[in-house]
Image (spheres, helix red, strand yellow):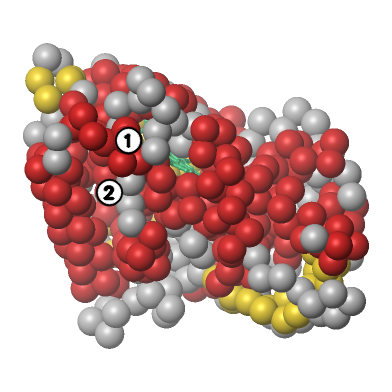
């Protein structure tokens, strides 16, 4: 297929649901690696598709700011969370917000909750009958995966998980028919944000009412651990002051969205990739490739399709002048398939070496939950391989209609159990 850069519309969610963004991105990397995309009237953005340029846009905060919004859904509007939420605050204030959270995320890393997470994963994956087979929607089964890990980290009740996943999807995939409300994309975004903020407002109010002292015991955390991430947000200081209630809510929202809509989409992409080519067993039977395979799954899935910045000053990118104030969209999925960096980028190679993918971004905003996401995915795939000897994709996948979220939302599969699973 020949793609003319002039015909490309990367702002159209249909490209990702029904089209082929990989071919489009390849053409752009080759012929127009930094190209202007007109959206409407005076509104538009620069699309950046090569690995080196994507990495620079994300990492070079002196040239590109996050404080005017980082998602295309906010193009042309100001971000009300700017300088209140870590993800949309530039250094140096960003770094002072991030340090305590980052420490807490490491301290309460998924490894500390490994048993709880493993049990949660086992509940997500249905057991196939001994010697028989089972048919189910694999993507739907994975939908709650982020909350299996985020639930304990944020102290969220199990009963709230389905609702939180639904609201997070409304905020991140507002064009997707599974999640869009009858009122359209703006109504979906507005309702998703409003309900999530109201949810966290109640949670934080409730948290304030309880003495901090009994939190570790209630959560079953080890001695010396002073609570969960909400407690960290409530007690941390930035520039000598506690976060305001609005800032606490905004960062809870950011943590939920950061994990809630990304993590779940890595396993379905990997299963579709491997099973579509009959190579599931190539990875499933190689425990030594678990870690490198997870990195490859992240590269291929690139669940966060893009992040946006605005130029703080005139910049030249790949020879193209970008004016001060212009929006610049870094396409992570394209960077992760740049043939200049990844040989045979369209092949899922669980043993791939030097896999320096950008699925978690780059620079000061590099994903704060990357360590947790990695541990969770390793636990997930280990459990998947222990449970199913074979997986066959039995129907067409449905892909999210979204410029931000890259994911399969429905994936019918047929599975057969491993001998180990039958013997359990
Ligand atoms: C496969 C799973 C995940 C992917 C692909 C992913 C991807 C990303 C990316 C690309 C960024 C950079 C955003 C930017 O440059 O503007 C980011 C930031 C962030 N992520 Fe993740 N993420 C994942 C899981 C998680 C999890 C599990 C958490 C929380 C426990 C999380 C919390 C965050 C936060 C708080 C930020 C903002 C960091 C900052 O501004 O310093 N993410 N993520």
Q: Secondary structure at mark 2?
A: helix
In which quadrant of the rendered image does the N terminus lie? Answer: bottom right
Q: For the residues carrying marks 2 and 1, which lies nearer the camera in this image?
A: 1
Q: Secondary structure at mark 1?
A: helix
227 to the left or right of 413: left
Callout 2 crowding tier (Cα within 10 Å): few <14, some 14–19, many ≥20: some
Residue 304 percent coordinates (x, y): 49, 50
Q: Residue at x 57, y 40 (%)?
A: 114
Q: Report the residue marked by disc 2.
A: 253
Q: Residue at x 25, y 65 (%)?
A: 192
> In this view of the protein, which residue sits in the foreground, 199 or 271?
199
Q: Residue at x 67, y 43 (%)?
A: 378
As drawn, the residue found furthest toward the top would be 240
Q: Quadrant of residue 195?
A: bottom left
Res 388 seen here: yes
Give the spatial CA distance, label 2 vs label 1: 25 Å
Height in image: 41 above or below 179? above
Ligand 1, by image quadrant, is top left
Residue 397 percent coordinates (x, y): 65, 75
Residue 241 percent coordinates (x, y): 10, 20
Q: Report the residue marked by disc 1.
A: 217
In which quadrant of the rendered image does the C terminus lie? Answer: bottom right
Res 365 seen here: no
Q: Residue at x 48, y 71 (%)?
A: 401
129 to the left or right of 99: right
> In this view of the protein, which residue sits in the foreground, 201 or 251?
201
């Amino acid at each position: 297929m020949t793609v003319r850069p002039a015909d490309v519309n990367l702002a159209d969610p249909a490209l990702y649901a029904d089209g082929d963004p990989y071919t489009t991105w390849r053409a752009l990397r080759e012929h127009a690696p930094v190209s202007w995309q007109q959206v409407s009237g005076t509104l538009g953005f620069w699309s950046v598709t090569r690995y080196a340029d994507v990495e620079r846009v994300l990492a070079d905060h002196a040239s590109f700011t996050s404080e005017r919004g980082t998602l295309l859904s906010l193009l042309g509007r100001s971000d009300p969370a700017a300088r209140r939420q870590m993800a949309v605050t530039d250094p140096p204030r960003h770094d002072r917000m991030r340090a305590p959270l980052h420490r807490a995320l490491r301290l309460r890393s998924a490894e500390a909750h490994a048993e709880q997470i493993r049990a949660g994963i086992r509940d997500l994956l249905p057991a196939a009958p001994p010697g028989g087979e089972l048919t189910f929607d694999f993507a739907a089964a994975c939908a709650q995966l982020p909350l299996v890990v985020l639930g304990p980290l944020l102290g969220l009740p199990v009963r709230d998980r389905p609702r939180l996943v639904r609201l997070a999807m409304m905020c991140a995939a507002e064009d997707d028919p599974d999640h869009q409300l009858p009122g359209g994309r703006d109504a979906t975004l507005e309702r998703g944000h409003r309900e999530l903020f109201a949810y966290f407002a109640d949670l934080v109010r409730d948290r304030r009412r309880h003495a901090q002292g009994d939190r570790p015991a209630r959560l079953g955390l080890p001695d010396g651990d002073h609570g969960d991430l909400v407690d960290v947000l409530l007690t941390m200081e930035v520039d000598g002051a506690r976060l305001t209630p609005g800032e606490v809510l905004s960062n809870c929202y950011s943590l939920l969205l950061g994990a809630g809509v990304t993590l779940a989409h890595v396993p379905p992409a990997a299963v579709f990739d491997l099973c579509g080519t009959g190579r599931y067993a190539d990875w499933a039977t190689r425990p030594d490739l678990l870690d490198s395979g997870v990195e490859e799954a992240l590269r291929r899935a690139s669940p966060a399709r893009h992040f946006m910045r605005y130029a703080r000053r005139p910049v030249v990118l790949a020879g193209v002048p970008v004016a001060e104030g212009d929006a610049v969209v870094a396409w992570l999925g394209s960077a992760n398939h740049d043939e200049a960096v990844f040989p045979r980028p369209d092949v899922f190679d669980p043993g791939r070496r030097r896999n320096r993918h950008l699925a978690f971004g780059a620079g000061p905003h590099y994903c704060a939950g990357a360590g947790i996401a990695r541990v969770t995915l390793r636990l997930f795939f280990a459990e998947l391989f222990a449970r199913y000897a074979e997986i066959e994709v039995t129907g067409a996948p449905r892909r999210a209609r979204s410029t931000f979220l890259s994911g399969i939302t429905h994936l019918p599969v047929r599975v057969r159990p491993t001998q180990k699973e039958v013997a359990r």
